[in-house]
Amino acid sequence: MSGRQPSLKMSLITRQLVLQFMAIAAAATGFIIFFVHSTLDGMYVEEEVVRIAANAIVRDAEGMPVVQMAPELATLQEEVPDLWFAARLDDGDTVVFGQVPPELASLVPHLEKLSSADIRGQFAPFSLSAIVRQLSGPLGDMKIIAHGRVRPFTTLITLASNVVAIALFLALALVSIIATPLIVRRALAGVVKTAEEAKLIDAERRGIRLSEGKVPREIFPLVHAVNEALGRLDEGYDRQNRFIASAAHELRTPIAILKMKIDAVDEKDKFSLSPDLLRLATLAEQLLDVHRLDNGAPSDPIELKILARSVAADLAPVLIASGKAIEVVVEQAGMITGNAGAIERALTNLIQNAVEHGGEEVIVRVKGPILEVEDNGPGIPADEYERVLEPFYRLKPRSSGAGLGLNLVKQVVDHHRGHITIAMAPGGGTIVQMKFIAVQYPPSGQC
């Protein structure tokens, strides 16, 4: 993978949010334009005048309501020379300041009948623009009709529409930011579940299929195709297993017959044929080992120094008869868990391979959870270390064997979650190392 893959979830969320924000912004802009260009025109009176008027109305020494020229009122009168207002108190008294236009004077005696009103004059100087409000002042509650500073009504509409538009935009944006990821996450829940299931697929856990029920319709063909591919792989794997098992079983019978015939010949011919027979028998058993491991062979504690000495003891007569030597060196005792028979045959295969392609001496070393087989032969070229582990590959095209030995050893080691490496020996030969996972070494006397 050359770089980080783009996120479908983030792409959907980002695009959805951008689309929603653009739609909201367009709606808000249209909302503002509509009201600014609506027929709601004229000049409106600022609300501040009724507050100033209510605070300026007090009682004189005789208890009569009068208008006291407070600083705020004086300042407002300087700004608005045609300032006027009239107030109707709860006790029925009326207070008037300035010149109330005749057109509105008739409303003053009836102010208590009005809850509120906005009156917009049509012609300059807009002295007929007024507002009616109920406020509380020093003399208590009162109804006031007043004229003060005036502003174009479009300014009020613009301000109000901006406030409403911004509030709606923020509210919808907040809902979008919270809701969109939840919606997208819920929509992709089936994809996430399928991805988690896909992580469980490996060579050791066959028969797994990806869930198809909750994936989106657009992704369903891909998931279905993957499941069909997994089915074909399982069928091919089963066929391969049946072939390996059948081939191994078929080989065991002629090997057994061949062994009986070899036992009947004289000692000289027997020892010349025994290495080939032993190698063929090991190969057949290793085919079965791979089959057993694929199908969950039992795992037991294994002490590698005992296993190495046992294998060396079994092979020693044949090797000595062929003029070869074998030695077991225990540098550090090691304990692992696994299938003892499979590991024994893997070690046997490595020793046989070292004898056939190596020199006259083979050393088996135990280094904790590591088994090493070293020979003093010509060695393997460094650029061939990986290839010799491939099935059916042989260093010398005309050499004996099918080229399966080292590959079968690798499969056994892989099944035990270990790994195999090849290196050059100090003396020029080859060292093949099988490294396993160590377990706690039991106390003396418990192995």
Image (cartoon, rainbow, N blue to C red):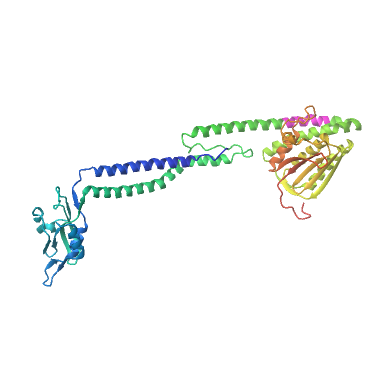
Q: Is residue 95 above or below residue 16?
A: below
Q: Residue at x 80, y 32 (%)?
A: 256
Q: Position of residue 80 (x, y in %)?
A: 17, 57
- Among all residues in the image, which is located at the extreme top? 398
Q: Which region of the structure is painted magenta?
A: 247-258
Q: Is residue 134 above or below residue 296?
A: below
Q: How many marks?
A: 0
Left or right of 166 on screen, residue 275:
right
Q: Position of residue 260 (x, y in %)?
A: 84, 31
Q: Position of residue 175 (x, y in %)?
A: 38, 47
- Among all residues in the image, which is located at the extreme bottom? 61
Magenta stretch holds residue 260: no
Q: Position of residue 272 (x, y in %)?
A: 87, 31
Residue in the foreground of this view, choosing between 415 and 262 = 415
Magenta stretch holds residue 252: yes
Left or right of 46 on screen, residue 272:
right
Quarter of the image with the N terminus is top right
Residue in the foreground of this view, choosing between 32 and 152 = 152
- Among all residues in the image, which is located at the extreme front? 78
Q: Residue at x 14, y 69 (%)?
A: 59
Type of secondary structure dominating the magenta stretch: helix
Q: Is residue 207 above or below residue 41?
A: above
Left or right of 230 on screen, residue 250:
right
Residue in the foreground of this view, choosing between 163 and 422 = 163
